[in-house]
Amino acid sequence: MKITEILMAEHVVFHNLFDHLEHNAPRLKTLAELKALAATLETLLRAHSNTEDELFIAPLEHCLEQLGQSETFHEEHEEIDQSLLDVQKTRQLGQARQRLAQAVAACRKHFDKEERSVFPLAERTLKSDTLQALGAAWMKRREAALK
Ligand SMILES: [Fe+2]
Ligand SMILES: [Fe+2]
């Protein structure tokens, strides 16, 4: 499987999670529940973003630089991660809810950009063999993590 197909499949799962968060976060009555949701998203996202940063961005670096996107891509991962960590710091329910909503909105924007421009760019510029090899590297990392 190509790395782009793997990342895209992960995106589908995240879109479901974003829907769930947008629907349920406004109804939650306690700070602990909001923080637990934010922590779940943060943990899952970290694994996804690390895969992109470590396996995907290096081979694409030269193309992303031409688009002026090289720094932005990594920065957006960090910004989203930070906004989710901020949810853990607040003691106010309303603020936690607002921060979480902002983080989900930032995720949607970032995912959309990847789907519209970064993944197609990889499909255009990297060879099919390279995309397959990166997919195999992802599989290996996953197997190692499960041991
Ligand atoms: Fe990303
Ligand atoms: Fe992504």
Image (cartoon, rainbow, N blue to C red):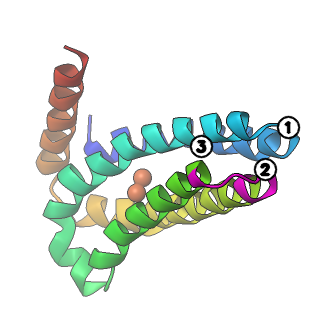
**In the rendering, which numbered label is found on residue 93?**
2
Q: Nearer the viewer, mark 2 or mark 3?
A: 2
Please provide percent x and percent y for residue 3: 27, 44
Quadrant where the image shows the C terminus:
top left
Label 2: how many Cα within 10 Å (few below 14, some 14–19, many 20+): some
- Identify the magenta region: 89-96
Please report whichever mark, 3 or 1, sits nearer to the chain's N-terminal start.
1
Residue appearing at x 51%, y 58% in the figure: 111
**Residue density around tag 3, few if under 14, some if 14–19, many if 20 or more, within 10 Å:** many
Residue 93 lies in the magenta-colored region: yes
Q: Residue at x 49, y 67 (%)?
A: 113
Q: Report whether the residue tagged 2 is closer than 8 Å to ligand 1.
A: no
Give the quadrant of ligand 1.
bottom left
Q: Spatial distance from mark 2 to mark 3, Cα to Cα?
A: 13 Å
Point out the residue furthest to the top here: 147
Marks 1 and 2, how far apart at CA: 8 Å
Residue on which disc 1 sits: 29
In depth, the one of 87 and 45 nearer the eye is 87
State yes or no: discs 1 and 2 in contact (Cβ < 8 Å). yes
Disc 1 secondary structure class: loop
Q: Position of residue 22 (x, y in %)?
A: 76, 47
Which residue position holds label 3? 38
Q: Nearer the viewer, residue 72 or 130?
A: 72
Q: Quadrant of the N terminus?
A: top left
Left or right: residue 136 versus residue 73 is: left
Q: Position of residue 144 (x, y in %)?
A: 16, 22
Of 114 and 29, nearer the camera is 29
